[in-house]
Image (cartoon, rainbow, N blue to C red):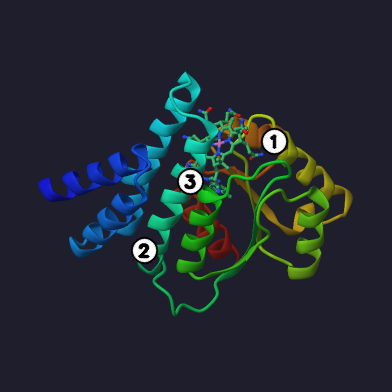
Amino acid sequence: MEREKAILEKLKEAIVNLDIEGVREACREAIDAGIPAYKCISEGMAKGLDMVGEKYEKGEYFLADLVVAGEAMKEGMKILEPWLKEGGVESIGKVVIGTVRGDMHDIGKNIVATMLSGAGFEVIDLGVDVPPEMFVEAVRKYRPHVVGMSALLTTTMIEMEKVVKSLEEAGLRSKVRIIIGGAPVSREYAEKIGADAYARDAVEGVAICKSWVSEEH
Ligand code: B12
C-alpha cells in the first residue's frame, strides 16, 4: 500500500514537473508493482494534469507547458494501454465517440474509448474538432447504440447541444443513447441539452454504456 501510494505520487509529480522520462519510468514501476492501469491514470497522471491546469490559470505555466504535460500523459498511456484493454472479448455494442467542434482535447476521450473497447464495445473514434454533421453521418453509417461526446472548454460545450439537435433533425435521435463528459459539463447540463447521461469519468461512462446494451438484450 505504501509502495503504491509512493508510485502514484511519483507519477503525479512527474506530470507536474513535465518530466516525460519520469512519467515513463513511474508507469513501468506501477505495472511491475501490479497497480491497476486505471488507478495510474485517475489517481496519478490526471491529478498531475489538474495541478498543471491550476498552474496555468495562475500564470505559473504557459501554453507550451500544457502541451508538454499532455504529451507526457500520452507517453504514459502508451505504456499503460495494453493493461487497460483486457482484449479478446466479442463486441457487445457499438459506440461512436468524438471531441466536439472547436475542441482539441483528446486525452480523456481516448481513455474512455480505450476502456470501452476493453469492455467489449466496438468503438468508432471520430477524433477531435468533430462538427455536428460528422456525428450525424457516423450514426447513419455505423448505426451505433451510443454516441459519446467530450468537451473540455466552456466555449465548446454548447456544440453538444447542436449535435443533439442535428440528430433530432436527421430523425436519428431516438435510435441512439447519448452520453457526454469532460470537465465543464455536468448531469444538469446533460439534462438541459437532451442528452441521456453524463459521466464523471471513464469508469462511470463504461458502466452506463454497459447498462444500456444489457437493457436491450
Ligand atoms: C492537456 C491540456 C491541454 C492540451 C490538450 C492535449 C490533448 N491532446 O488533449 C493542449 C495544450 C492542446 C490544450 C490546449 C488548450 N487548452 Co487545455 N488543458 C489541458 C489540461 C491541463 C488537462 C486536460 C486533460 O487531458 N485532463 C486529463 C483527462 C484524463 O481528464 P478529462 O479530459 O477530464 O477526461 C476524463 C473525464 O472528464 C471523462 N470524460 C471526458 N470526456 C468524456 C467523454 C465521454 C463520452 C465520457 C463518458 C467521459 C468523458 O472521462 C475522462 C477519463 O476519466 C486541462 C486542465 C484540466 N485539469 O482539465 C486544460 C484546460 C482544459 N485547457 C484550457 C484552455 C483554456 C486551453 C486553451 C484555450 C489554451 C489556449 N490559450 O490556447 C487551448 C484550447 C485548444 C482547443 N481548441 O481545444 C482550460 C479550459 C478552461 C475552460 N473552462 O474553458 C483548462 C481547464 C486549463 C485551465 N485551468 O485553465 N490544453
Q: Nearer the viewer, mark 1 or mark 3?
A: 3
Tell me the kind of residue under disc 1: Thr
| Separation of residues labelled 3 and 2 (CA atoms) | 15 Å
Looking at the rendering, the quadrant in which ligand 1 lies is top right
Whichever of callouts 1 and 3 sits on the residue coming sooner in the sequence is 3
**Is disc 1's CB within 8 Å of ligand 1?**
yes
Q: Position of residue 140 (x, y in %)?
A: 81, 65
**82 sits left or right of 200 in the view:** left
Q: Secondary structure at mark 3?
A: helix
Q: Position of residue 190 (x, y in %)?
A: 64, 37
Residue at left 52%, top 37%?
A: 64
Residue at left 66%, top 51%?
A: 128
Instruction: From the viewer's side, name the closer residue of 101 and 115.
Output: 101
Q: Residues within 10 Å of mark 1 (few under 14, many from 20)?
A: some
| Separation of residues labelled 1 and 2 (CA atoms) | 30 Å
Residue at left 79%, top 69%?
A: 141
Q: Position of residue 30 (x, y in %)?
A: 23, 57
Can residue 176 be seen at all in this image of the molecule? yes
Q: Secondary structure at mark 1?
A: loop
Mark 1 highlights which residue?
Answer: 156
Can residue 217 be seen at all in this image of the molecule? no
**Is disc 3's CB within 8 Å of ligand 1?**
yes
Q: Taking 151 as reference, is 98 above or below it? A: below
Mark 2 highlights which residue?
Answer: 79
Q: Residues within 10 Å of mark 2 (few under 14, many from 20)?
A: some
Q: Residue furthest left?
A: 2
Tell me the kind of residue under disc 3: Gly
Which quadrant is the C terminus positioned in? bottom right
For residue 70, the mark is 3
Whichever of callouts 1 and 2 sits on the residue coming sooner in the sequence is 2
Tell me the kind of residue under disc 2: Ile
